[in-house]
Amino acid sequence: MRAHLHYVHVGTACQVAGCGHTTATEAGMRVHIRQEHFPFAERSQYECGWDNCGEVFSTWTTALECFHKHQAIALTAVVTQKQQD
């Protein structure tokens, strides 16, 4: 269930520092992340790409899942902060 939440529910505002891109749908945000922050290239190892993560994976899809997890966690922190304000 947690993997589903981290992959599907990434929000519509990019949480990458300095980006600020927004989309109308979460599907649009997944496309934005894949195209702008996670360019595909044939390699033997793929790094997550999130600041200070540093995890390396054997497939780009697994690294992308890790990136989505960070996006979802950052989004949750933003929503929680707004609720407390």
Image (cartoon, rainbow, N blue to C red):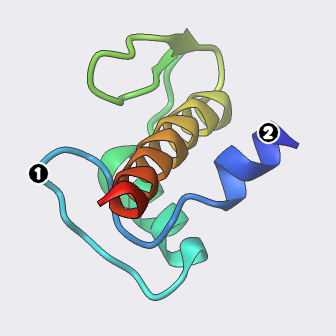
Viewer-closest of 9 and 61: 9
In the rendered image, the vertical position of residue 8 relative to residue 64, given as above or below: below
The residue at the far bottom in this view is 24
Residue positioned 33% across, 47% down in the render: 37
For mark 2, what is the residue? 2
Label 1 close to label 2 by CB (< 8 Å) = no
Quadrant that contains the N terminus: top right
Identified at 45% across, 52% down, the residue is 80
In the picture as drawn, the residue positioned furthest to the left comes out as 18
Other residues around mark 2 within 10 Å, as few (<14) / some (14–19) / many (≥20): few
Q: Is residue 62 left or right of residue 73?
A: right
Q: Position of residue 76 (x, y in %)?
A: 50, 49
Identify the mark nearer the N-term, 1 or 2: 2
Instruction: Name the residue rendered at 66%, 29% in the picture.
Output: 62
Report x, y in % for residue 20: 19, 65
Above-or-below relation of 46 to 6: above
From this view, report whether residue 34 is shown above or below residue 40.
Answer: below
Q: Position of residue 59 (x, y in %)?
A: 65, 25
Residue found at x 44% / y 73%: 12
Mark 2: amino acid? Arg
Looking at the rendered structure, the secondary structure element under dot 1 is loop
Q: Looking at the picture, which amino acid does disc 1 mark?
A: Gly
Could you say which is closer to the camera, residue 44 or residue 26? Answer: 26
Q: CA distance from mark 1 to mark 2?
A: 27 Å
The percent coordinates of residue 60 (x first, y second) are 58, 32
Residue at the front extreme?
85
In terms of image quadrants, where is residue 36? bottom left
For the C terminus, which image quadrant? bottom left
Residue where numbered disc 1 is placed: 18
